[in-house]
Amino acid sequence: MEIFLKNSKFELFLFYLEGTPMIDFDLRRCLLLEAKGCFLLTNKQALDPYTVDRKNIMFGLALKKYVMRVTGEDMHL
């Protein structure tokens, strides 16, 4: 991730924001509705990968629910 964030080719197009997709404020803050893409990053070194997977699935569903609630349109995951 740092490679992309520090690359001048991407610096105008790529932003890293810390927050949670479970909070609407964070989704508005990152301008989710204007984004062309969204990546959910995971910890590949986690001691319990199943818990991390479940968390990311919940985050993906939270993004989908937010988009549906605000725009009335479905979002592909």
Image (cartoon, rainbow, N blue to C red):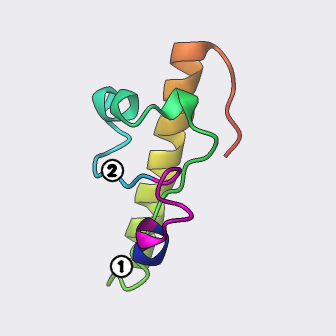
**Circle 2 — which element?**
loop
Residue 7 on the magenta segment: yes
Q: Which residues are the magenta region?
A: 5-14
> Is residue 29 highlighted in magenta?
no
Q: Which mark is residue 17?
A: 2
Residue on which disc 1 sits: 48
Q: Residues within 10 Å of mark 2 (few under 14, many from 20)?
A: few
Quick one: which residue is furthest to the front in this view?
8
Q: Is residue 58 left or right of residue 77?
A: left
Dividing the picture into quadrants, the one containing residue 50 is bottom left
Among the two numbered marks 1 and 2 on one chain, the one whose residue lies closer to the N terminus: 2
Q: Quadrant of residue 1?
A: bottom left
Examine the rendered structure and indicate whether residue 53 appears above or below residue 18. below
For marks 1 and 2, give the one nearer the viewer: 2
Q: Residue at x 34, y 27 (%)?
A: 24
The residue lying at 35 percent from left, 79 percent from top is 48
Judged from the image, the secondary structure of the residue bearing numbered disc 1 is loop
